[in-house]
Image: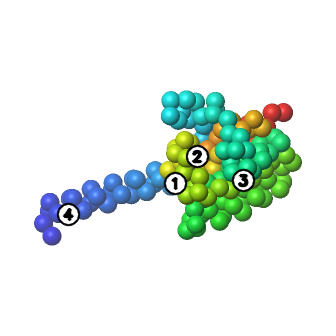
Amino acid sequence: MSMTGALIAAAVLAAATLFGLLWRRRDGVLRAGRRQNGTDAVDTALNPDDLGGAELGEKATLLQFSSAFCAPCRATRRVLGEVAEMVDGVAHIELDAEAHLDLVRRLNVIRTPTVLVLDAAGRIVRRASGAPRKPDVIAALGEAIPT
């Protein structure tokens, strides 16, 4: 291998490593709702009609977008279900992304699992792409549920 080829290979390896580290750092992190389609996500309120008839939680809702062949979706379902059972007034709703394409496009869901933490009025308080950790979900509910 020539010296130029070795340099190119090293540069590609370094770039791939950097990308992987950044991806890993952001995966599953619950961030504040962001601007989508020209409006603040927090101003976008979801209702049972948007959610295929599923009722919002009395205090908050954990909305999960999944797909059929998504392995992290199963772990996310378990974590969100456990949190919803632990906290009174919190509902967990799981939607198949393929069956709700209009909502997926409206909310800019680009991968599964995507988790949205909604307040009692259905406004997006936090969102995560990837499987969030249980303590992070509980902390996000603290922001969604007024004291």
User: Alpha carbon of mark 4 to alpha carbon of mark 2: how far?
Assistant: 47 Å
Do the residues under discs 4 and 2 have CB atoms within 8 angstroms? no
Mark 4 neighbour class, 10 Å CA radius: few under 14, some 14 to 19, many 20 or more = few
Which numbered disc flags the more N-terminal residue, 2 or 3? 3
Mark 1 neighbour class, 10 Å CA radius: few under 14, some 14 to 19, many 20 or more = some
Task: Please tell me in which quadrant of the rendered image residue 40 appears.
Answer: top right
Label 2 amino acid? Leu
Q: Residue furthest left?
A: 2
The circle drawn on residue 103 is 2
Which numbered disc flags the more N-terminal residue, 4 or 2? 4
Label 3 amino acid? Ile
Do the residues under discs 2 and 1 have CB atoms within 8 angstroms? no
Give me the residue at 47% from left, 53% from top.
23
Task: Please tell me in which quadrant of the rendered image residue 77 appears.
Answer: bottom right
Q: Report the residue marked by disc 1.
A: 111
Q: Report the residue marked by disc 3.
A: 93
Q: Report the residue marked by disc 4.
A: 6
SS for callout 3 = strand
Q: Is residue 135 visible?
A: no
Label 4 amino acid? Ala
In the image, which is nearer the foreground, mark 1 or mark 4?
A: 1
In the image, which is nearer the foreground, mark 4 or mark 2?
A: 2
Instruction: Depth check: give the residue in front, 45 or 81.
Output: 45
Do the residues under discs 2 and 3 have CB atoms within 8 angstroms? no
Q: How is the image coloured?
A: rainbow
